[in-house]
Every structure is written in structure tokens, then in C-alpha cells.
Image (tube, rainbow, N blue to C red):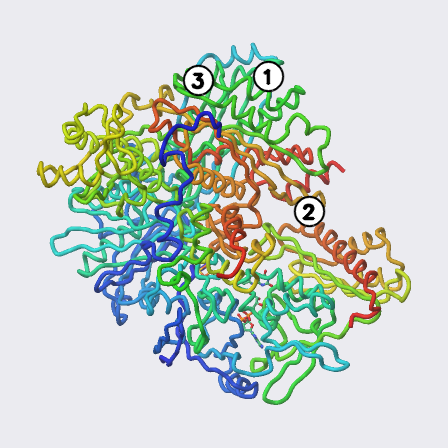
């Protein structure tokens, strides 16, 4: 971090320990799977063995006769209202009714007095299916006369996006060098270690209490109420700790609906914890993508035009697919480099595979993989310098993109410069070790995209009569550290230690829930709300303090648990005395509130792709060093250097950890992770043994550097940051492999077999 | 048929009647009620159910509780001493080695088994020791640093 | 593909002698499963691939968890010795390097503390890592029933993926490995997709001894796993090397022969290529270890 930029903050910007750490490191932190209520029954779900089939009949009479079974529900036990992220793509039901559209889709659920009986009962449910032809690939889905998956549609295309800014044809004409390549990326599993879990109780009046492992309880709540045809007030959602989300735990899932229906039927709480097998085989994955991309540049590397066609294979339901394909272009291609002409066409298709939505980094990692790979190839073709060309094209503070996205602060150039310094770029060409390579990539990151529907953030700061502070916000602690970062902001404003800020489980009856934990949003959006709530509480106290200190209320400062006037710091009162005064003398409880909405941003136009999506852009540059074993083709990621402009990191340690984690996570997709299916659409992996994710042995060394730009739009200058390295790692690894052995792999994962096949051909 | 099983967990003797089909993990979580030990996969792949039995880290999802009869078992709840965190736990906090925390109990147990037997482990030994613990948050580098910072047995 | 469940119910019998275990086996043929470390069996039961009525635990049988000298026959390893114990034994690391290395590779630390060498063989997976090492070391198994015991070389043990010559009422009790003669050394090399917790794609073990004073290969055995329905010896590659002066070129040739002896099913071409690489690495390391072996004998 640039030392000169360190402001005089007490806790903001400091690498303090996480507030949820002590509970987590002692095993006391409670996750959904740890919860029990009196009388809890245990639920299990029967899943389809077919990828595509009509359900002709379900007979569960045998299951009901098993001792200990209390209830069975099927798709018919729900109101039949479809839910989804957008009105035009509401295509999901709590459980299949007449048709299953992917392997592992829920068809029935059982509640029993224990888990063993519930499992046994699944074998006693007889389902008659009529197998249908499964649609498994983009070709299957888009070909003439394709089998149509959704009866209410006449195509398998769930959504499309077309954009054209400038004039690409003209752009290519003006270019000195044009190259076009195809890239394909695979489905990967999300891979959180905590499988989905929920406990639901429906009381005698029909009030529903959901406690689940939810990344975005708001989304679950809305989906749930819609599909169950209930007003929001009938459903309360309380969120325990979440064992990893990575975008896999936003929506209401079959287990949530099943547990609710079973609880309603039996009158007892019902708990359902999935096996990791079910999660890996049948739950959300990253889209598989075909990307055709063409770039035109000048001899000196100046980027002129880019044209891209993308098709995303997304499985049985649309989920956030329609956003995914737009974000691919807006956040994935149109930044961080300036360009004058851009054309894009994308489709998101249904197939009979588990549905895909966002996964850590949304579609940005894939877009950056395609763009930065081709860009890298072209820079090499022209014999130019990888860093210089990237710097030359990087967007600058205050500039706008061709689709009218405005960039406030932008430290991309500085980040690239620093990256070069840290990896010794200039001296490196001479002493390059054999089979070692360095790859570079850059990426932007939104600070929470503005979405349709509820999008504002709010927070309440309650100051107790003994000076304690209770912070209520709508963010969800999923490991990203939001409770710590938000507490740091509140503590900074109120002038109390972070440890004295209490936070609670997120509760829809207490807090206004955040729209969700996505697109690196929470620090920026909830951060603003928390800061404002804390300021509001301080404002209320300042009014009481002003006459006591004979000062103007605007001069009152809160610091180190004391309150004083900026003009006369010598005369101070203890924070606790001021609070007591408020409560006991004035009879005034202190209750600050704050909210934030980026309502200055018009909803981005999903059709044209024009307009702002966020109030601040963060920028990331990464260099990855790899070593390739030329005999086996195995790639080892040795080191990652990440430089970035995130405005101001509120907690640099947590930021580093998240970015390191993002690199490890994404390196799996780069090198070996892949969800495979057989010719009938049945998954070929259901465990962490067949589905390979990085272990400690795969984790590289890390170095970091923050360019401080103190974004005026961000709370304490912060921008969204959590997913930054996901955008850069795929491309950086692909570029590094090429640097190491001259092999360019354009279809992920970059497996040893592929590397060796090319090396062999060449020998 | 249930069988009598005696387990000493975190120094407390539990005299239980247990069905042979119960895994040690199920007994710890569901019968004894210590939920700090996590179930991530139930197949021995992820390490989140790691406990220390007879000084060794084991996957409690792959052990029949009846076969643990008479054994001494330490779970994550037995690592801190009356509210005083173990130096390893302090190190995890200090180095930012925790994110979602779901893998953390297993990581701490693997690490504790290592440093209980080896007071100055090499980095390679540390990595080996936690190579059976998956962390999807990806915090491995920090976890390794945290463990390395704890030089001696407490 | 099945989703994992909790364990099915069964009766548990803790045997205190081999005889007792054999009796339970022969009285309930087809309904019993032996439980050693449980790292394969319990997973298979959770997957409902096996649903035994009885499970016999062997852990109370004394003597099966030791590594002992057995006179001229060599080193006798009890079936219940864990991978961890083998991997960490200095004697193993020095004299039976390939086996120590193979056991160090298996699963995870948490699995190695439970899983046994006997369980690895009896499970008979094509990718059992201890098998190539034990094949290279010329291991002989002691198999026991109520009727008596027999000695079977490991090469005769596997009959197909997950199947062996074990009778329904038969138990593996000991694995004996003869001491390597003369200046000898061994090594195990394997390939996986990632570094830890991963099934072996290609595994190759080599154990060889040199004629006193030079680089002539007196004897060599090469074991492979994951490249055929069962772990196998690469006999043709062995005879290419036997009695010859070792050179990098000769080893390269033998490795290609080994590659031809393998019959992998998936990723066949890549795996066959990798057999050559792993065999080359294993033989080369075994050679260098033998050459550096000052004692002139494995023991
Ligand atoms: C996460 C994980 C990773 C793994 N990784 C590897 C790996 O990398 N390489 C590898 O080779 N294996 C691996 N395994 C498989 C397993 O750990 C080994 O095969 C282990 O050695 C099995 O031994 P066990 O004592 O646990 O056997 P058990 O599960 O107890 O038994 C296995 C089978 O052998 C039978 N059996 C056991 N002992 C005897 C006996 N004495 N006589 C007759 N029959 C007997 C049992 O009835 C059962 O059918 C892995 C397992 C897991 C869970
Ligand atoms: S739950 Fe035991 S290893 Fe995953
Ligand atoms: S901290 Fe989330 S899995 Fe490790």
C-alpha cells in the first residue's frame, strides 16, 4: 500500500482479526446443519434418475407404511407457481410435477423420525417415468427440430443479448492486425464444503420459519414466498453461518420447499441436509461456454475493435443466465481497456443438465479468459510488450466506455506498472528458466451491480444505555468477512473498539435484507448504509453533547470512546456518560439509521447493454508463474502476484485472503475441474474424489499490492473487490502455460493430456 | 442391536448404547451433541470431520463408533482450554486463516495432531498434514503460515 | 451412480482370533464382510454397493498389526498395519522405499491412519497403490481359513477389478516381502490429476539389484497399477533390463516396452505414454538408490 495514502483511521484500513473468527476457530459457530428444534423430523429427497422424462405416476403408499415415516410430499403439494430471477424467466417449480428436466431433480420428499428411516423410505416410493430424449449440448438445443425442454416455450433459448456500439466493420477496417479465435470453457461445480442444509418450522397459524445455509436470504425468501404463494410477512428467514456460498446458495432450493411442505403436513420442524453427492451431481454449476472472439488492433497494440459471439449452455433452468450473458460483455469485455467499436451476440440455452447460474466471479472469468488469451497472442504476434500494451489501453479515471459506463477512479495503469516491478518483468526475458512461464491478465470488477427489484441497502445502529453498540444490517457473513468489515466501518464512525460492536444472525423480521451477496457488493452497498447509520446515531448524540461541551454539534468528534469538540479536544466526555445522559436525562434512546441506493444509476438496459451498472469499478492485474513438466504435461502454479485498485481496502488481510482464495478456486477450473456427463445426461462425478478441486499442494505463493485511489463514491473510499482475482486467474494461467512451453490451449481445462498431445504433434 | 460403547471425548467419559451402524462422526454430532466437527462429504474426502484419536488425526466419518470403544478422542471443542484459545487457534485468527469457517475445525485438528508430535514442522510437513483438508474458500497459504507460526507445543 | 447414504444396519462381531473370524465367515458365507480400516468398506456400504448382514472387526486380533522380521523369508507385515505406519517406518523408507512411498501417497493423512495394507490388497482396486510396490518387491501373501493356511505370491492374487482368489471364508493375515539381495534399491512413481487426495492415473514401482561393483542389473521387478484391470507386472520390460548394463537409453527402451504391456481403458493414449514416463522414473531412481547403497545389501 502506498504509505503516503494511509489516512488517519483508527480501524478502517487495518488488517484486524475477523469478528466471527473466535466462534469459527473453536467449533462454536453454528451452521444450518447443526440446528435442531424440539420434535425435529428428518427429511430426505427422492431424485430423478433421468435427465429428461415425463412423470407418469408417483405412488408412495409403501413408503407411508414404513414405521417412523410421517409424511411424503411431491410436486403436487405445491401451488404450482413458477419462480425465477426475472419475470420473463420464471421457469422453476419447488419440485417436478409432470416432467423432470435434469438428473437429480427432486420428485418427492419424505419426513421421518430419523434420517435412516427417511432414507429407507425413498426406496419405497414408486415413480413411473417415460424417458424423453435428453438435450445435452448446445447443438442438441439449437438445432433445427430440437426437442423442446420447457413446454411453455417454443425454443431452448432462455435468453439472448445483442449489442453493437460504434461500428465494428469500420473498426476492423481501421485495424492493422486482426485475429479471431474460438475458446470453450467447461462446466464446473461450485464446491463449497458445507452441503445445502435447512430446517423449517411451520406453526399452527401457518407462519414459516426458515433457517438455512443461505448466501442471499433475501433471494431465498422472495423465491420461497412466490412459489408457496405466501406474503412475505408469513415467512421469517434467519441465517446461521454459511459454509461457503460462491453464488451457489442464493435461491430457494428443493430442500427448502420440501422441508416446509413436510413441516406443514406433520406439524413438526423438518430438517434436510443434503449429501455432498447430491450437491455435486445435481446442483448449480458454472455455464459451459463457446466463445468466438475477434479483436482488431493497431500495429502499436492500440485496441480498436472487438466482436464476440457467445453461447452459454446452462442446464434446465434459466436462473441468472439472462444477466450472466449481459455481464459477460459489460463487465467482462468492455473493460478494463478502451475500445471504439464493439459488437456482441449471445444466447443462453437450456439443456437437460443441472442448472447453471453465477459462480464466484459470475461470467467475468470466462470473458476475461477469452479476451486476455487472444489479446496476449496478438501482442506476441506483433512482438510487443505484454505490459506496455495493456497499460496503453487501460481505461483512466473519469473516462467512459463505449457503452456509456462511467469509470470514476481507475488505477489500472498503476496496478500494471507495479505488477511489472514486483515480478521483475524487464529483466526476465534474459534469464527465463526452461518450462517456467509467467502469464499476465487484467480484469475489472463491479462494486455491486444495480439490479431490478429491491436493491437498496439499509442498516440500524442501536446504542445501548451502557455504551454497547448493536449493528443490524442486511449483509450475510458467508466467509467473505462482511461482519468484520461492516463492524470496522461502524467502529470507525462511533469511535469504539470493533469488539464492542455486536451483530446478530441475519433475520428478515429484524433487518431489511440486502438484495443479495453477489457481484462484490456488500462492502460498498451495505458499507454505505452502515456508515450512514453510525453517523446518524452520532448525530443524535452530538446534539446532546454540543451544549454539554459548549460546542457546535458539527464539531463533535467521536474517538477512543470519548466525545469532544474538534476545536477543543482537551475538554471531553466519556462516550458512556453521553449515552447515559441521552437515555436517563433526555429519555432519548439512540437509534441510528442509514440507507444507500445507487438510484442515480438507471437500470442497465439488458437489451442494448448500454448504461452504468455500478457506482465504482475496481481493477485487478495478476501475474501467475507456472512450471510445466514436459514429460507428463502437468502444470504447477508456483506463484501469484496480484496488484489492484480497490479504492481503499477496509481490511487488507481479509481482502488478500479472498483474492488468494479466488486464485486457488479458479486455478481448479483452469487446470482440472470439470463436470462430465454420460450420453444420457447422467453426471460422472458425485464426490470430491472424482470432482477434483485444489488442495493445499496446489496453492501458490502470493504477493499483493494495493493502489489506493480512495474512490469518492465508496464508503471510506472502498470499492467492491471480493471476486477480483477470479477475473484474472484463468487467463493468467493460460498465458503462463503458453509462455512456459509454447502451447496454447483454448479449451478449458488445460489438462496434461491436451498439453502432451500438442507437444507430441510438434516433436 | 445396540452395544455398550465408552468414549472419552475431550476428557469426558461417555457411556453410551450405540447401534453398530453409527459412525463416530454421527455419535459425536448427534448423540454427544458436539457439532463443531463437520460433515462435508461423509466419504473421507474433505477432512472436515477430522478428530484426533489416539494422537492421530482420523476421518471420523470412516470409523464405526463401536470400534472406537475405549478410545481417547479430541474434537475441536477440546482444543481451547477453558476459554483460552490454543496457540494454533490464535495463529489462525492472527493470519486470517479463516473464511467461511466450515473447514476450520478439521484444519485445526489436523494441525494440532501435527504440532503435538512435531514441535518445529517444516513447511512440507505442514502441507502434508493438511493435504486431506479441502478449503474451497482457498485459504491454504494463510493456513500454512498460521501453523508455521506456532513453533512449540503449548 | 448412487448418492451416498448413512450406513445400512448390520450385526457387528469383534473377532479376537483369526480362527474366530474364519468361523464367522464360514458359518455365514456371502453375508459377512471383514472390516479392517474401513476406508473402502464403509464407503461401499454407504453407497449400498455392499450390504452385509454381519461385519467382522479384526482390530482385537493380536499380532496382525505388526511389522516383524521373519528369518530368511524376509519381513512380515501384518494385514492390519496402516499406511501411515509403513510410510513412517525408517526401515521401510530405507529398505523398501517403493512401498513406503506408495503408502505415503494413499488418500489423506486421515485415511492413512485408518486404512490398512491388507485392506488395500483385498479391496483389489485396479489403482491400489501398494500393489505395484508389493509386486516389485515379490510379496507373498498368507491366506488363512478354518481349514488351514496357504502362501500365495501377490501376482496370483488378483483375478479382476475388485476381485481376488480369496475364498468366501478366507482371510489375508500376513504379507511377506523377501529382503532384496545385493546392492539394491526401489522406487515408486505415480501420476495424479492433482497432488493430494487423488486416485492414481498411472503408478509404477521398480525394485532392482545390481551386480557387485558395476551397473549390471542382476534382478528387477516392475509393478504397475491403474493401467490394466488389475495391478500387473511388466514382465517384458523386466527381461529387457535383466542381466544388462543399465544406461538411460536401455531404461528408456524398457519403459516403452512396459507401455506396450499396459492396457488402460480411459485416456488410453495418454496413460500408455505415461506408463513409459513413470517406469523410466521409477527404474532410474531404483538404480541410483541401488548404486548408492553402500551396505551392498538391502538389509
Ligand atoms: C479419501 C480416500 C482416498 C483414497 N485414496 C487411495 C489412494 O490414493 N490409493 C489407494 O490405493 N487407495 C486409496 N483409498 C482406498 C483405501 O483407503 C485403501 O484401499 C485402503 O488401504 C483400504 O484399507 P482398509 O483397511 O481401510 O480396508 P477396508 O475398507 O476395511 O477393507 C477393504 C476390503 O477388503 C476386505 N478386507 C480387508 N481386510 C481383509 C483381510 N485381512 N482379509 C480379507 N479381506 C479383507 C474388506 O472386507 C473390504 O472388502 C482411498 C480411500 C479414501 C476414502
Ligand atoms: S466428512 Fe469425513 S472426510 Fe468429509
Ligand atoms: S474457510 Fe471456507 S472452506 Fe475453508
- The Cα atoms of the two marked residues, 3 and 1, are separated by 21 Å
Is A295 on the left or on the right of C246, as rendered?
Answer: left
* Foreground: disc 2 or disc 1: 1
- The Cα atoms of the two marked residues, 3 and 2, are separated by 46 Å
Q: Secondary structure at mark 2?
A: loop
Out of A661 and C223, give the one closest to the viewer.
A661
Pointer 1: residues within 10 angstroms few (<14), some, or many (20+)? many
Is A717 on the left or on the right of A340, as rendered?
Answer: left
Query: Of marks 2 and 1, which one's residue comes earlier in the chain?
Result: 1
Q: Secondary structure at mark 1?
A: loop
Q: Residue furthest bottom?
A: C147
Pointer 2: residues within 10 angstroms few (<14), some, or many (20+)? some
Out of A232 and C257, give the one closest to the viewer.
A232
Where does label 1 land, which residue?
A301
Out of B45 and B49, give the one closest to the viewer.
B49
* Foreground: disc 3 or disc 2: 3
Where does label 3 land, which residue?
A397
Out of A539 and A403, give the one closest to the viewer.
A539
Query: Of marks 3 and 2, which one's residue comes earlier in the chain?
Result: 3
Give me the disc on residue A632.
2
Pointer 3: residues within 10 angstroms few (<14), some, or many (20+)? some
Using the rendered image of the protein, determine whether residue A480 is visible from the camera's viewpoint.
yes
Amino acid at each position: 500500500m502506498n504509505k503516503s495514502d494511509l489516512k488517519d483511521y483508527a480501524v478502517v484500513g487495518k488488517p484486524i482479526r475477523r469478528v466471527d473468527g473466535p466462534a469459527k476457530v473453536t467449533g462454536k459457530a453454528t451452521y444450518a446443519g447443526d440446528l435442531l428444534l424440539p420434535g425435529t423430523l428428518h427429511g430426505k429427497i427422492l431424485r430423478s434418475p433421468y435427465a429428461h422424462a415425463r412423470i407418469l405416476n408417483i405412488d408412495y403408499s409403501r413408503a407411508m407404511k414404513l414405521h417412523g415415516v410421517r409424511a411424503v410430499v411431491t410436486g403436487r403439494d405445491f401451488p404450482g407457481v413458477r419462480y425465477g430471477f426475472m419475470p420473463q424467466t420464471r421457469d422453476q417449480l419447488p419440485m417436478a410435477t409432470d416432467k423432470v428436466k435434469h438428473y437429480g431433480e427432486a420428485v418427492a420428499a419424505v419426513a421421518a423420525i430419523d434420517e435412516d428411516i427417511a432414507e429407507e423410505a425413498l426406496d419405497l416410493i414408486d415413480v413411473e417415468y417415460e424417458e424423453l430424449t435428453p438435450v445435452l449440448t448446445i447443438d442438441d438445443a439449437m438445432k433445427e427440430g430440437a426437442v423442446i425442454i420447457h413446454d411453455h416455450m417454443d425454443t431452448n433459448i432462455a435468453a439472448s443479448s445483442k449489442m453493437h456500439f460504434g461500428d465494428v466493420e469500420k473498426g476492423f477496417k481501421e485495424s492493422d492486425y486482426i485475429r479471431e479465435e474460438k475458446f470453450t470453457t467447461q462446466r464446473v461445480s461450485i464446491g463449497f464444503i458445507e452441503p445445502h442444509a435447512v430446517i423449517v418450522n411451520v406453526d399452527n397459524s401457518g407462519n414459516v420459519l426458515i433457517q438455512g445455509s443461505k448466501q442471499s436470504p433475501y433471494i431465498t425468501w422472495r423465491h420461497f414466498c412466490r412459489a408457496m404463494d405466501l406474503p412475505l410477512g408469513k415467512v421469517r428467514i434467519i441465517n446461521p453461518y454459511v459454509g461457503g456460498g460462491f453464488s451457489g446458495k442464493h435461491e430457494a432450493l428443493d430442500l427448502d420447499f420440501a422441508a416446509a411442505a413436510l413441516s406443514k403436513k406433520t406439524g413438526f420442524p423438518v430438517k434436510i441436509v443434503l449429501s455432498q453427492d447430491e450437491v455435486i451431481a445435481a446442483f448449480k454449476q458454472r455455464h459451459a461456454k463457446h466463445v468466438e472472439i475477434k479483436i482488431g488492433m493497431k500495429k502499436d497494440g492500440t485496441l480498436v475493435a472487438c466482436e464476440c459471439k457467445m453461447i452459454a449452455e446452462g442446464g434446465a433452468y434459466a436462473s441468472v443466465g439472462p444477466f450472466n450473458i449481459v455481464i459477460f460483455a459489460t463487465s467482462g469485455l468492455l473493460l478494463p481497456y478502451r475500445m471504439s467499436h464493439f459488437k456482441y451476440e449471445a444466447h443462453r440455452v437450456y439443456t437437460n443438465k443441472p442448472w447453471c447460474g453465477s459462480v464466484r466471479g459470475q461470467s467475468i472469468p470466462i470473458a476475461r479468459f477469452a479476451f486476455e488469451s487472444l489479446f496476449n497472442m496478438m501482442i506476441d504476434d506483433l512482438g510487443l510488450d505484454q505490459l506496455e500494451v495493456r497499460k496503453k489501453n487501460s481505461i483512466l479515471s473519469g473516462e467512459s466506455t463505449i457503452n456509456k459506463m462511467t469509470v470514476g477512479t481507475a488505477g489500472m495503469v498503476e496496478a500494471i506498472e507495479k505488477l511489472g516491478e514486483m515480478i521483475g518483468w524487464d529483466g526476465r526475458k534474459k534469464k527465463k528458466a526452461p518450462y517456467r512461464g509467467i502469464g499476465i491478465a487484467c480484469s475489472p470488477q463491479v462494486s455491486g451491480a444495480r439490479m431490478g427489484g429491491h436493491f437498496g441497502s439499509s442498516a440500524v445502529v442501536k446504542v445501548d444505555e451502557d455504551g454497547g453498540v448493536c449493528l443490524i444490517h442486511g449483509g450475510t457473513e458467508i466467509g467473505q468477512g462482511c461482519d468484520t468489515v461492516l463492524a470496522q466501518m461502524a467502529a470507525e464512525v462511533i469511535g469504539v473498539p470493533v469488539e464492542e460492536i455486536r451483530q446478530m444472525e441475519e433475520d428478515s423480521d429484524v433487518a431489511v435484507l440486502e438484495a443479495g451477496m453477489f457481484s462484490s457488493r456488500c462492502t460498498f452497498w451495505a458499507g454505505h448504509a452502515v456508515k450512514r447509520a453510525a453517523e446518524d446515531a452520532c448525530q443524535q448524540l452530538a446534539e446532546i453533547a454540543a451544549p454539554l461541551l459548549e460546542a457546535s454539534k458539527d464539531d463533535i468528534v467521536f474517538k477512543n470512546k470519548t466525545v469532544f469538540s474538534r476545536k477543543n479536544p482537551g475538554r471531553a466526555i466519556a462516550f458512556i456518560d453521553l449515552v447515559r445522559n441521552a437515555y436517563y436525562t433526555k429519555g432519548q434512546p439512540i437509534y441510528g439509521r442509514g440507507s444507500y441506493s445507487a438510484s442515480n444509476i438507471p437500470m442497465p438496459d439488458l437489451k442494448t447493454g448500454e448504461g452504468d451498472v455500478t457506482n465504482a469499478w475496481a481493477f485487478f492485474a495478476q501475474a501467475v508463474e507456472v512450471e510445466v513438466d514436459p514429460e507428463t504435461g502437468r502444470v504447477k502454479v508456483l506463484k501469484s502476484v496480484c496488484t489492484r485498485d480497490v479504492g481503499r481496502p477496509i481490511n487488507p488481510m481479509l481482502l488478500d485472503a479472498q483474492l488468494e482464495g479466488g486464485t486457488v478456486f479458479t486455478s481448479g477450473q483452469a487446470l482440472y475441474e470439470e463436470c462430465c456427463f454420460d450420453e444420457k445426461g447422467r453426471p460422472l462425478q458425485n464426490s470430491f474424489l472424482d470432482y477434483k478441486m485444489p488442495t493445499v499442494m496446489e496453492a501458490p505463493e502470493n504477493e499483493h499490492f494495493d493502489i489506493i485511489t480512495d474512490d469518492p463514491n465508496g464508503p471510506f473510499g472502498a470499492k467492491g473487490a471480493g471476486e477480483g482475482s477470479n477475473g484474472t486467474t484463468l487467463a493468467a494461467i493460460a498465458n503462463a502455460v503458453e509462455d512456459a512451453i509454447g502451447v496454447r490451449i483454448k479449451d478449458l481445462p488445460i489438462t496434461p493430456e491436451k498439453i502432451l498431445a500438442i507437444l507430441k504433434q510438434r516433436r | 442391536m445396540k452395544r455398550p460403547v465408552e468414549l472419552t471425548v475431550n476428557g469426558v467419559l461417555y457411556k453410551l448404547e450405540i447401534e453398530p451402524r453409527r459412525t463416530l462422526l454421527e455419535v459425536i454430532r448427534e448423540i454427544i451433541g458436539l457439532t463443531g466437527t463437520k460433515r462435508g462429504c461423509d466419504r473421507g474426502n474433505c477432512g472436515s470431520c477430522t478428530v484426533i484419536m489416539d494422537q492421530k488425526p482420523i476421518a471420523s466419518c470412516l470409523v464405526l463408533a463401536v470400534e472406537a470403544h475405549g478410545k481417547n478422542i479430541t474434537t475441536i471443542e477440546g482444543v481451547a482450554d477453558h476459554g483460552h484459545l490454543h496457540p494454533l487457534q490464535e495463529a489462525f485468527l492472527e493470519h486470517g486463516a479463516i473464511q467461511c469457517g466450515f473447514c476450520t475445525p478439521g484444519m485445526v485438528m489436523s494441525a494440532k495432531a501435527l504440532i503435538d508430535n512435531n514441535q518445529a514442522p517444516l513447511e512440507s510437513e505442514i502441507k502434508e498434514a493438511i493435504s486431506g483438508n479441502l478449503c474451497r474458500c482457498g485459504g491454504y497459504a494463510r493456513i500454512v503460515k498460521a501453523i508455521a507460526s506456532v513453533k512449540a507445543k503449548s | 451412480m448412487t448418492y451416498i447414504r448413512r450406513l445400512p444396519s448390520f450385526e457387528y462381531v469383534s473377532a479376537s482370533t483369526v480362527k474366530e473370524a474364519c468361523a464367522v465367515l464360514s458359518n455365514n458365507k456371502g453375508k459377512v464382510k471383514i472390516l479392517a480400516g474401513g476406508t473402502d468398506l464403509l464407503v461401499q456400504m454407504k453407497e449400498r454397493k455392499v450390504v452385509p448382514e454381519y461385519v467382522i472387526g479384526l482390530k482385537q486380533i493380536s499380532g496382525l498389526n505388526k511389522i516383524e522380521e521373519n528369518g530368511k523369508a524376509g519381513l512380515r507385515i501384518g494385514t492390519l498395519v496402516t499406511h501411515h505406519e509403513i510410510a513412517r517406518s525408517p526401515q521401510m523408507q530405507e529398505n523398501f522405499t517403493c512401498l513406503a512411498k506408495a503408502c505415503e501417497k494413499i488418500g489423506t493423512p486421515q485415511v492413512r491412519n485408518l486404512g490398512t495394507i491388507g485392506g488395500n490388497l483385498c479391496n483389489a482396486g485396479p489403482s491400489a497403490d501398494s500393489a505395484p510396490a508389493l509386486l516389485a518387491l515379490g510379496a507373498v501373501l498368507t491366506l488363512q481359513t478354518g481349514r488351514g493356511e496357504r502362501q500365495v505370491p501377490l501376482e496370483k492374487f488378483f483375478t479382476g477389478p475388485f476381485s481376488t482368489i480369496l475364498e468366501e471364508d478366507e482371510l489375508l493375515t500376513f504379507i511377506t516381502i523377501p529382503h532384496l539381495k545385493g546392492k539394491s534399491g526401489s522406487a515408486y512413481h505415480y501420476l495424479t490429476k492433482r497432488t493430494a487426495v487423488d486416485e492414481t492415473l498411472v503408478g509404477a514401482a521398480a525394485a532392482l539389484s545390481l551386480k557387485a561393483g558395476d551397473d549390471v542389473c542382476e534382478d528387477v521387478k516392475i509393478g504397475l497399477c491403474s493401467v490394466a484391470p488389475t495391478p500387473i507386472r511388466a514382465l517384458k520390460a523386466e527381461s529387457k533390463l535383466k542381466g544388462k548394463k543399465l544406461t538411460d537409453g536401455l531404461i528408456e527402451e524398457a519403459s516403452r516396452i512396459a507401455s506396450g504391456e499396459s492396457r488402460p481403458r480411459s485416456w488410453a493414449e495418454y496413460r500408455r505414454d505415461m506408463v513409459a514416463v513413470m517406469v523410466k522414473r521409477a527404474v532410474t531412481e531404483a538404480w541410483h538408490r541401488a548404486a548408492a547403497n553402500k551396505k551392498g545389501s538391502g538389509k
